C-alpha cells in the first residue's frame, strides 16, 4: 500500500513509521514540519519524507493525497499546556486545518485514518452527576458513551471539542456520501520518543511522564502533582498501540470503515500520584547510579499555578477495547510495570549517552 503519514515526525508517528518500515511491503510518505525524531529513518528504503505544513502547503499535500491508498492524519497540538495557553491555535490546527485534509480525501476518494483522542469522552458521568468515579468505574465505549465536556470558561476542553467536531463531520460525510474513514482514540500512550525533557529543552511543558523523568534525572524540581494527582490514567505502551493502529491502517478484513476504535490498556490504571511513586521506586531499584540527583520529593501544585486559568481534567479514562479485540484480533500485551520500566529505560539510556559524550552539563547550564 502507498501510505501517506501526516504528522509522522511526532511521538506516535515515528513509532508507527518504524514499525511499518520493519514490516515492509508498503511505500511510505512521511510529512511533518519537524524531522528531529525521524532523522534516523530519513534514508530508509521505502520511505519518502517531505517537510510540509498542512496549513500552508495544501497544493503539495493534495498531490500526495492523490497518489496515496490511505491517508493517516496524526497532525495536532496534543499537549495539555497548549490547550490552556493557546486555545485558538488548538482549534485552528486540530479542526480547521485537519478539515482540509478530510476535504482532499473526499475529493480524491481516499480512505482516511484520523487520529482523535480519548479526551472526547470528557468527564465521566459519575463526575458530571457529583458521584465518585472511583466507586463507579465506567469504561468508555466508542458507540454508546455520551461525551461530557466541562464549561466553556475552562478552555482546556477546546482540544476535545475540536477533535469531537472533526469526528462528527467525518460521520456526517459517511452518512451522506459513504466517505471511508476510521477514527483512532488513543488512551495515554507512552514509550520511546514521547517528549523532550524541560531541563534539556531550556524549559517548556511536556506531558507528565517527561516531567517526572526530568525530576528523576536532573533533580531541578520536585515531582509535581497537579491538584494532588488524584485523577486516574491507564497507560498504554506505544508498541501495543502501534500494533493496533497498523491493523486499522491495513484493514485486512475490510471491517474498519466508519468505525471508531479505542486504543488503550484498561488494566493499566493508576492515579498520577501512584505513577509518581512507582516511577521513583523503579528508578531507584533499576536505574539509579552514583552521581544522580537525590530522590526527588513529590509535591502537590494547583492546576492554576501549573497550567494557568482555564484548566480542568478528565477524572478517569477506562477504554472499552472490545471492538478492537473483536474486529482486529488485537490485545495489548504490556502491563503497567513493563510500560513504566521500558519508557524509563529509553529516557535513562538517552541521558547516559549524553553523560558519556559530555552534553548533559551544557544542557543543564543552558536552563
Ligand atoms: N500520545 C497520546 O497518547 C495521544 C493521546 C490522545 C490523542 N493523541 C492524538 O494522536 C495524534 C498524534 O499524537 P502524538 O502524541 O504523536 O503528538 P505529537 O505532538 O508528538 O505529534 C504531532 C506531530 O504533528 C506535527 N505537526 C504540527 N503541526 C503541523 C503542521 N501544520 N503540518 C504538519 N505537521 C504538523 C508536529 O510537528 C508533530 O510532529 C494527535 O492527533 C493527538 O491529538 C495522542
Image: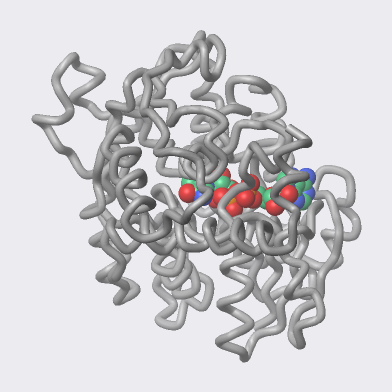
Give the mark count: 0
Vertical position of residue 102 compared to residue 270: above or below:
below
Q: Quadrant of residue 328?
A: bottom left
Q: Which colour scheme appears in the figure?
A: one colour
Residue at point 63%, 28% (across, down): 82
Residue 2 on image: x %, y %: 70, 80
Vertical position of residue 11 compared to residue 1: above or below:
above
Residue 71 on image: x %, y %: 66, 65
The N terminus sits in image quarter: bottom right
Most foreground residue, 321 or 337: 337
Residue 148 on image: x %, y %: 34, 26
Q: Can residue 170 be seen in this view?
A: no
Residue 272 on image: x %, y %: 33, 35
Q: Quadrant of residue 41?
A: bottom right
Residue at point 29%, 76% (across, down): 329
The C terminus sits in image quarter: top right
Residue at point 49%, 73% (across, down): 246
Vertical position of residue 49 compared to residue 341: above or below:
below
Residue at point 54%, 41% (across, down): 214
Q: In this view, does 200 lie to the left or right of 304?
A: right
Q: Can residue 294 be seen in this view?
A: yes
Residue at the extreme left: 135
Amino acid at each position: 500500500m502507498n501510505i501517506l503519514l501526516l504528522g509522522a515526525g511526532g511521538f506516535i508517528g515515528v513509532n508507527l513509521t518504524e514499525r511499518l518500515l520493519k514490516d515492509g511491503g508498503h511505500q511510505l510518505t512521511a510529512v511533518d514540519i519537524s524531522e528531529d525524531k525521524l532523522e534516523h529513518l530519513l534514508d530508509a528504503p521505502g520511505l519518502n519524507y517531505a517537510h510540509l505544513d498542512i496549513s500552508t502547503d495544501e497544493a503539495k499535500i493534495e498531490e500526495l493525497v492523490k497518489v496515496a491508498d490511505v491517508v493517516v492524519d496524526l497532525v495536532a497540538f496534543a499537549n495539555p499546556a497548549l490547550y490552556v495557553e493557546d486555545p485558538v491555535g488548538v482549534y485552528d490546527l486540530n479542526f480547521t486545518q485537519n478539515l482540509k485534509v478530510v476535504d482532499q480525501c473526499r475529493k480524491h476518494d481516499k480512505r482516511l485514518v484520523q487520529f482523535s483522542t480519548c479526551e472526547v469522552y470528557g468527564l465521566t458521568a459519575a463526575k458530571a452527576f457529583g458521584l465518585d468515579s472511583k466507586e463507579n468505574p465506567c469504561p468508555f465505549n466508542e458507540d454508546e458513551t455520551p461525551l461530557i465536556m466541562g464549561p466553556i470558561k475552562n478552555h482546556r476542553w477546546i482540544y476535545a471539542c475540536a477533535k469531537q467536531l472533526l469526528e462528527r463531520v467525518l460521520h456526517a460525510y459517511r452518512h451522506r456520501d459513504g466517505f471511508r474513514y476510521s477514527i483512532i482514540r488513543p488512551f495515554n500512550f507512552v514509550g520511546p520518543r514521547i517528549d523532550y525533557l524541560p531541563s534539556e529543552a531550556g524549559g517548556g511543558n511536556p506531558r507528565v511522564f517527561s516531567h517526572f523523568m526530568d525530576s528523576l534525572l536532573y533533580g531541578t524540581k520536585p515531582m509535581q502533582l497537579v491538584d494532588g494527582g488524584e485523577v486516574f490514567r491507564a497507560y498504554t505502551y506505544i508498541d501495543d498501540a502501534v500494533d493496533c493502529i497498523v491493523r486499522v491502517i491495513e484493514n485486512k478484513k475490510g471491517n474498519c470503515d466508519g468505525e471508531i476504535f479505542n486504543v488503550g490498556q484498561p488494566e493499566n490504571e493508576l492515579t498520577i500520584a501512584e505513577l509518581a511513586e512507582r516511577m521513583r521506586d523503579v528508578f531507584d531499584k533499576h536505574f539509579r547510579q552514583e552521581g544522580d540527583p537525590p530522590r526527588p520529593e513529590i509535591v502537590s501544585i494547583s492546576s492554576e499555578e501549573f497550567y494557568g486559568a482555564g484548566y480542568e481534567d478528565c477524572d478517569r479514562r477506562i477504554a472499552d477495547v472490545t471492538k478492537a479485540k473483536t474486529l482486529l484480533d488485537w490485545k495489548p500485551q504490556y502491563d503497567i510495570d513493563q510500560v513504566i520500566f521500558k519508557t524509563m529505560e529509553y529516557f535513562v539510556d538517552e541521558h547516559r549517552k549524553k553523560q558519556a559524550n559530555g552534553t548533559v552539563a551544557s544542557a543543564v547550564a543552558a536552563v
